[in-house]
Image: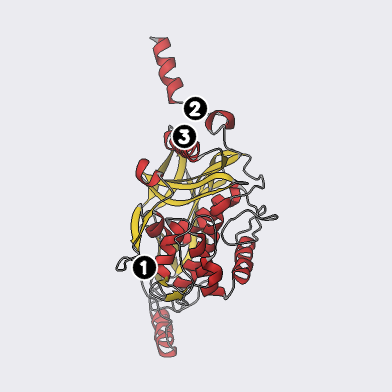
């Protein structure tokens, strides 16, 4: 009986593998959980390498930011330049002078990895590809990427154009957390461009995990001679989302298999634990000179932590408040709550107001002062 119990307990321990065992053919790779940034697995994560079309993810951040700010719209029509139409490699076969919407070009980038599509969008947003690439490198600095520099927006091989598995995981994380509309495009398995024309073009996602691996909805494939076969994949199952990056694979079949192995390892060894639901009241704060004396501190989103599969940890909480001034609008961010395990921050979520709070006027303050004297509150 003791042997059986020992074996059972052994099976409950998450099985750790080496980089050589899990993704032996990849030059480098990483597996992370995006909400916490927890690294679950890594192999040569900071090595500077060519990354092919994974480059386009930084361009996609800029495109989505432009849409979010209202500077461009999905139904804007872009006139394709001769420069954009002449791009080699993967493409959607744009013609010089052709007109296509921003949305369809974004599909061309996200689904077919079209070099011509990303250059057309780059020129539409910044005037030239070179100016757009400068914005990409500015974004690299904003994201604090230490091992990344771009020479073009396509990912075509060029001296001095490189990144790393870790940096690409940060880019993927930014897309998912701050520009989640990317998943509307990256999750498309097949679609059509030029739908109502004689030149109808069938799009099929270069990321085969979209159809082959349950829960996968992104993000980007890449391949050049220097970079080999690369993939940034994201999959969500049972409230747990993972991001896997593999770089420098020999072919697409091996790339897909090792990415699946990486994701399997993550889902088998870690879990997302819900501590408090979105909208839960964590605490309340007193407000002087306000029409409401107390305002609730409410979770903006679910508060989760990432644990090993068999963990059952106990956590402490710490609330940090922003400088608060009146008036307060409903859903204003008032601070955040930290989740602590052994004094280490393992989770964090924003706290918002669930109501509007206004500042009392002079008359209200005077009346309150009189009432406080009457009732002995001062």
- Quadrant containing the N terminus is top left
Residue 234 in the image: above or below residue 298:
above
Residue 114 in the image: above or below residue 49:
below
Q: Position of residue 145 (x, y in %)?
A: 63, 56
Write the residue at 50% across / 39% down. 255
Q: Position of residue 64 (x, y in %)?
A: 47, 67
Question: Is 188 on the left or on the right of 109, as rendered?
Answer: left
Quarter where residue 184 is shown:
bottom left
**Residue 218 numbered tag:** none
Write the residue at 53% across / 67% down. 84
Density class for disc 1 (Cα within 10 Å; few <14, some 14-19, many ≥20) is some
Question: Is 179 on the left or on the right of 52, as rendered?
Answer: left
Q: Earlier in the sequence, mark 2 or mark 1?
A: 2
Q: Position of residue 67 (x, y in %)?
A: 45, 72
Q: Closer to us: mark 3 or mark 2?
A: 3
Density class for disc 3 (Cα within 10 Å; few <14, some 14-19, many ≥20) is some
CA distance separating discs 1 and 3: 43 Å
Density class for disc 2 (Cα within 10 Å; few <14, some 14-19, many ≥20) is few
Please name the residue that numbered disc 2 is placed on: 15
Q: Earlier in the sequence, mark 3 or mark 2?
A: 2
Question: Secondary structure under badge 2?
Answer: loop
The front one of 60 and 190 is 190
Residue 339 in the image: above or below residue 15:
below
**Residue 354 numbered tag:** 1
Please name the residue that numbered disc 3 is placed on: 261
């Amino acid at each position: 009986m003791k042997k059986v119990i020992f074996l059972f307990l052994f099976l409950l321990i998450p099985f750790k593998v080496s980089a050589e065992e899990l993704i032996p053919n990849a030059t480098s790779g990483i597996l992370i959980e995006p909400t916490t940034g927890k690294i679950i697995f890594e192999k040569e994560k900071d090595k500077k390498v060519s990354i092919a079309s994974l480059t386009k993810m930084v361009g996609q951040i800029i495109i989505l930011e432009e849409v979010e700010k209202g500077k461009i719209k999905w139904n804007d029509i872009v006139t394709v330049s001769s420069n954009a139409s002449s791009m080699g490699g993967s493409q959607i076969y744009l013609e010089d002078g052709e007109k296509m919407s921003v949305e369809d070009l974004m599909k061309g980038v996200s689904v077919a990895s079209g070099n011509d599509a990303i250059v057309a969008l780059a020129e539409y947003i910044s005037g030239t590809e070179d100016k757009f690439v400068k914005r990409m490198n500015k974004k690299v600095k904003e994201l604090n990427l230490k091992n990344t520099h771009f020479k073009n927006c396509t990912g075509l091989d060029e001296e001095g154009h490189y990144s790393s598995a870790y940096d690409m995981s940060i880019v993927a994380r930014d897309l998912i957390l701050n520009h989640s509309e990317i998943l509307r495009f990256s999750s498309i398995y097949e679609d059509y461009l030029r739908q109502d024309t004689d030149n109808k073009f069938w799009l099929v996602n270069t990321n085969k995990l979209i159809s082959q691996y349950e829960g996968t909805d992104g993000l980007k494939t890449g391949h050049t001679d220097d970079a080999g076969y690369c993939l940034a994949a994201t999959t969500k199952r049972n409230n747990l989302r993972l991001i896997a990056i593999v770089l420098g694979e020999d072919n697409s079949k091996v790339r897909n298999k090792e990415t699946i192995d990486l994701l399997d390892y993550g889902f088998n060894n870690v879990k997302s634990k819900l501590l408090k639901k979105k909208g839960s009241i964590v605490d309340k704060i007193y407000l002087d000179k306000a029409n409401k004396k107390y305002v609730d501190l409410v979770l903006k989103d679910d508060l989760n932590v990432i644990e090993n599969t068999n963990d059952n940890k106990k956590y402490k909480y710490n609330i940090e408040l922003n400088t608060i001034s009146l008036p307060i609008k409903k859903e204003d961010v008032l601070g955040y709550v930290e989740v602590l395990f052994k004094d280490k921050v393992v989770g964090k979520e924003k706290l918002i107001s669930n109501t509007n709070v206004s500042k009392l006027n002079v008359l209200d303050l005077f009346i309150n002062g009189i009432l406080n004297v009457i009732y002995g509150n001062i």
